[in-house]
Amino acid sequence: MSFDLLFDPLFRVPFFTGLLLAGLLPLLGMYLRLRNEWLAALAFAQMASAGALLAMVFDWPMVAGGVLAALLAALLKGLAARAGANAYALMMLLAWAGGVLLVANHPLAEQAGHALFDGQLYFTGEGHLAAAALVCIVVLPLLAWLSRPLLLGRFFPAFYRARGRDERPRLMLFDLLAGLAVALATVSLGVMAAFALVFVPPLIAYRFGSSWRAGLVWSALIGMAGYTCAFVASLGFDQPFGPVCALLMVMLFVISSVKYNRM
Amino acid sequence: MADDFLLRVSGLVAGYAAPVAGPLSFALHRGEILGLAGPNGAGKSTLLKALWGGVKVFEGQVEKAPDLQISHQAQGFDDLRGVPLTGRELLGLTGASADGLPSWLAERLDRRLDRLSGGQLQFLRLWACLTAPADLILLDEPTNNLDRAGVAYLIDWLGHAHSGQGIVIVSHDHGLIDEVCTRVVEVGA
């Protein structure tokens, strides 16, 4: 066990890349949970991993492949809105099968596949950091703008239609933003770490948030704190980041549940 | 009176896969509160939805005033347990005002919705539709799940002049219809 690596400049770029995404993903997760669409995040992540692997096989940038595949998934989700969770499950199966077959049949895909499935955050470079910063700059203001339509969609589904306005373009934009952020997180943090950061912090924030705004703050803080602990633990104990992050997130939920039940 | 025109409905037959309600005809002007009465299963809620395009119109016409803003309070409510939204945030979504809320609800506005009673939540949801910026308010069984204080407050509020708006109410509560509606249209079974 050694924590000396924590202060190695080599790990600063991966750390800050993940930290940015760990603040952003839970915010998107709050709205996905609001719409009962949190499973979509896992579908986006699986599609992004398959897209990244496919891109690598064709010698294209993995980030671009992952983002394109997740955006395609977001588009399909929007078009197949009535299918709901069935569409996410079908996408997950398709992406998983494609990803595993690529790993099994292409020597180059094997190492990248492990990185994506295990969550080897330490392979992220400055390109990932720049992309994460750019995604935060684009997504955060748009998410603030979309917040009201998304909340109205849950609490007053007929609000816009009764006023002769179509809310679907805004909902589609949210899907694309979620797909973009999850794709980048998948190629930077791994499939399950990205999903854990979308799923668990909102799960806790929904319980403890005294308001929607407070819930958003809670979820971002829980995401960043949990991520930081996972980064330190995985580096200190020389373990793959993805499972450590997922384990820590589950532990956070269990601890918060005990506290919640005592309240 | 022509300037006060909000809605003109003629021979409206509406439904989903097949027609289930109608025909219905009426005209509505600002300042009027119209009650849609009829037996259970007559399709009153379906016709109410048809006024803004929420269901399929099979026959007839719904002519609206230009730029008509409609606020629709639908029956039922999603399960809100676990969503960290306060009453004040809920009102903010529709642009509704907290002014005029009964004191028993105004003092609870900063609580999460899942910390309110069923009656308080229903009244708040109703208020969010009643006071949202709109020319026409459509209320579908507004007294459902309201406690006695809520019903009394609603009747009192509707009883005051709302000259700028028109209201259409569907309700099985004859007391409400008789007390607040300026006109009643029967919907056949």
Image (spheres, rainbow, N blue to C red):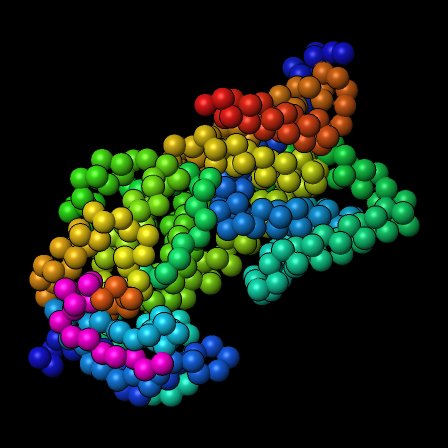
Horizontally, is A224 left or right of B95 in the view? right
Q: Quadrant of residue B61?
A: bottom left
Horizontally, is A64 left or right of A132 in the view? right
Residue B52 forms part of the magenta stretch: no
* Residue found at x 58% / y 46%: A38
State the extent of the magenta-drawn residues as a range.
Answer: B175-189
| Residue A8 in sight from this viewpoint | no
Horizontally, is B90 left or right of A88 in the view? left
Q: Nearer the viewer, residue B120 or B86?
A: B120
Quadrant containing the N terminus of chain A is top right
Q: Position of residue A12 (x, y in %)?
A: 63, 24
* Residue found at x 55% / y 30%: A223
Horizontally, is B57 left or right of A249 in the view? left
Q: Position of residue A60 (x, y in %)?
A: 75, 51
**Image height check: is A109 above or below A3?**
below
Quadrant containing the C terminus of chain A is top left
**Image height check: is A99 above or below B5?**
above
* Residue found at x 71% / y 58%: A90
Residue B177 forms part of the magenta stretch: yes
Q: Nearer the viewer, residue B60 or A22?
A: B60
Q: Quadrant of residue A81?
A: bottom right
| Residue B80 in sight from this viewpoint | yes
